[in-house]
Every structure is written in C-alpha cells, then in structure tokens.
Amino acid sequence: MKSQSFSEDPQAELPDCFRNEAHVEKLVKGLKNLKKGLLSAAVQRLRRLRLFLSRRN
C-alpha cells in the first residue's frame, strides 16, 4: 500500500452529498443500525459458542 501526503488538502470543499444535512443524517443512522446488527450477531455467536463449550465439559 502506498500513500501520499499533501501540504494542502487537495479536496478542501466537502462533496455535495455531504452538504445535504438530511442525507448525512440518513447515512449516520444507517451506520448505527449496521453496527447494532453486527454486534447483535456477534453476541449471538458468542452465546452459542459458550453453550457448545459448556456441553463439552
């Protein structure tokens, strides 16, 4: 992986899609819901693993 640094921001202005407050709010809510869903799935897997391991002992 190669990166490059700049003395000034090459894209100093926000893209148009991030200037629309409603659009940004929708994106953030979507990310929060995704995070909740991923955490919930991970917790369920850990519970199943714990149950599996407890039955082996």
Image (cartoon, helix red, strand yellow):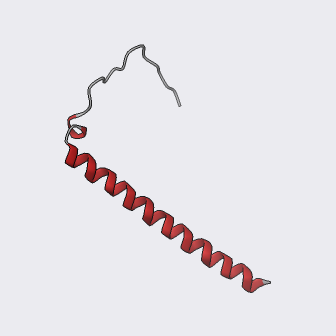
Quarter of image, res 16: top left
Q: Specify whether 36 is left or right of 16.
A: right
Q: Specify whether 8 is left or right of 42.
A: left
Residue 52, percent from left and from top: 68, 81
- Please report the residue visible at 20 percent of the width from the left and 48 percent of the height from the top: 22
- Please report the residue visible at 38 percent of the width from the left and 15 percent of the height from the top: 8
Q: Residue furthest top?
A: 7
- Please report the residue visible at 50 percent of the width from the left and 69 percent of the height from the top: 41
Q: Is residue 18 above or below residue 52?
A: above
Q: Nearer the viewer, residue 34 or 1?
A: 34
Residue 33, percent from left and from top: 37, 61
Q: Is residue 52 above or below residue 15?
A: below
Q: Specify whether 44 is left or right of 27.
A: right
Residue 10, percent from left and from top: 33, 20
Q: Is residue 8 above or below residue 15?
A: above
Q: How many marks?
A: 0
Quarter of image, res 29: bottom left
Which quadrant would the C terminus be assigned to in this image? bottom right
